[in-house]
Image (cartoon, helix red, strand yellow):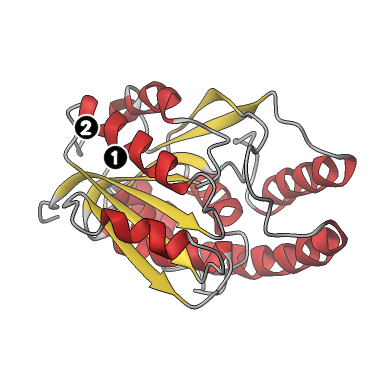
Amino acid sequence: MPPKDYELALVMPVYNEEGCIATVVRSWRDRLRAGGINFVMVIINDGSRDRTADILHEFASDECIRVIHQANAGHGPTLVRGYRQAVAMADWVFQCDSDNEMEPHSFGGLWDLRRHADAVIGTRQDRRQNLQRRLISLCSRATVELLFGQGIEDVNSPYRLMRSSVLQPILECIPADTFAPNVVLCGALTFAGARVRSVPVPCRPRQTGRGSIVRWRLWTVALRSFGQTLRCSRQVRRSQLRAQYAAGVVDTPARAR
């Protein structure tokens, strides 16, 4: 596999985060710089209606930050776009959200495990959820276990580090409009037999803005996500992902840096 330009590509989808986005971007940039990592931040503004675009423009001259503006497509499709760009740029891909619920100081715990894993998932701790969201989180995990097998606790965690050589063939099984690609990714990692580690990460309540899914729509999108995950699971099973991983076609920790 040809060498990549960066060691790490951070993918951050953004929607209506004018209250915190400048602080979030700076804190992640400074944390990665302090770690001596050769990195690039891929920040995708998903059609924000507030001042988010204007604030992100302030980072236009920063060579380690690439800002992409697009019409609103939703969190999931924005993630898929970011992942597909990131795997072509860096050896590792890290995804985090822009709401500052999970902060940069926990990143080192994931980064330190990278030589012994294909993916490191930050398991959200002290997370405050209403009953609906707790039930949907349980349903997401049960869906992954039913369709792909057991293995990962926080299947929709927005704080995850993944080896590009393992992530790239999985993305080929995920359509661009997938609502919850992280759920499918966790399932595919489990199905392939990839080495996945979990690290507890503090999750604090959102300080600014609000979530992009209103409460009455939660079960609607949950059903949509289940249907998409089911279709993706069929594609994953038809693929040669498990065989490729077992045969070493996909780089493993023993082969990749």
Q: Residue furthest bottom?
A: 71
Checking the image for residue 140, the label placed there is none
Q: The residue tagged with tag 1: helix, strand or loop?
A: loop
Quadrant showing the N terminus:
bottom left
Observer-nearest of 13 and 19: 19
Q: Which residue is mark 1?
A: 252
**What residue is drawn where x is 76% and y is 65%?**
221
Q: What separation in Å lies between label 2 and label 1 (alpha carbons)?
A: 26 Å
Quadrant hosting residue 115: top left
185 in relation to 253, above or below: below
Observer-nearest of 97 and 125: 97
Observer-nearest of 226 and 135: 135
Q: Is residue 215 left or right of residue 244?
A: right
Q: Earlier in the sequence, mark 2 or mark 1?
A: 2
- Answer whether residue 188 is visible to the viewer in this image: yes
Q: Which residue is mark 2?
A: 33
How crowded pointer 1 is (Cα within 10 Å; few <14, some 14-19, many 20+) is rated as many
Q: The residue tagged with tag 2: helix, strand or loop?
A: helix
